[in-house]
Image (spheres, grey):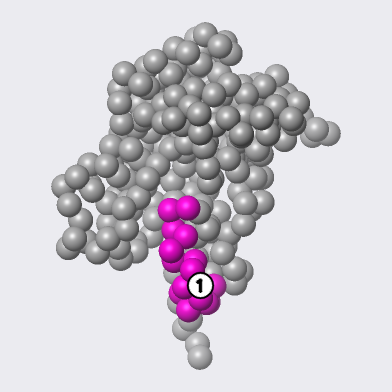
Amino acid sequence: MTNPLFDLTGQTALVTGASRGLGQIFARALANSGADLILTSRNRDDLTSFVAEIEAMGRKATPLALDVRDQGSIERMAAEAEAACGQIHILVNNAGCNVRKPALDVTWDDWNLILDTNLRGSFFVAQQMARRMVPHGYGRIVNVGSVTSVFGYAGLAPYGASRGGIRQLTMSLADDWGKHGITVNCLAPGWFHTKQNTVLYQNEQWVEYLKDRIPVKRPGEPRDLEGAVVFLASESSRYITGQTLLVDGGISTGAMRATV
């Protein structure tokens, strides 16, 4: 790295939900900027090939099992991460899920699955990492939200509630932990093609509709998130905390034409 503001050499970053999708995008970006990684997934074996990929980049990669819906699992993971790697400088709180249904069809169990994973899990992972960051007087916590943190979409009621909660949680934790040298920010992607929403992207008519509503006229690509996560994880964002950074091609502007 030629710019020390974005250099993560010598730092360790923990990325949750790293067996696929956005978690791997974030992890690769941090590794490319010099960070060693702790990667988590509910099934540790699901991380095997990705660990090999990161190690081939010349970085250390430690795979750990984590179920963010289980308090004991969170506590065990945090202890194992500290024992294996010592100081953890960065947390990317990425693990999440969704159940896409009309609001009238959402069940009690659907709601609990989404909120327990996306919101409760994110809080308690952040809490465990912050307890280990406080003694060092330094930390970067990046909570992964969504454009649904600030914008409503039919069919995503519990998901949007969980991501809106992430935005509020980010502000509260930033205020709580800023005095300890820990910044807490929310990275909110817009519409990216992931395993969760593959069914939508198989519909060409829907994709055209989506592109029409995005001011830059295309869905997000992995490279669009790389700079943002490194920025929030590095020294370059040292005076930024409690903020939500939308990486959405502008769809959160409302993206509704007022002219023909």
Residue count near mark 1 (Cα–Cα under 10 Å), binned few <14, some 14–19, many ≥20: some
Whether residue 84 is in magenta: the answer is no
Residue plotted at (60% across, 43% down):
25
Answer whether residue 161 is visible to the viewer in this image.
Answer: yes
Callout 1: SS: helix
Q: Residue 177: where, in percent of width, then height?
A: 43, 23
* Picture quadrant where residue 117 is located: top left
Part of the protein shown in magenta: 195-212
Q: Residue 85: where, in percent of width, then height?
A: 58, 13
Q: Is residue 242 left or right of residue 247?
A: left
Residue at which label 1 appears: 207
Q: Quadrant of the N terminus?
A: top right
Whether residue 209 is in magenta: the answer is yes
Q: Nearer the viewer, residue 220 or 133?
A: 220
The amino acid type of the residue labelled 1 equals: Val
Residue plotted at (58% across, 21% down):
62
Q: Is residue 195 left or right of residue 111?
A: right
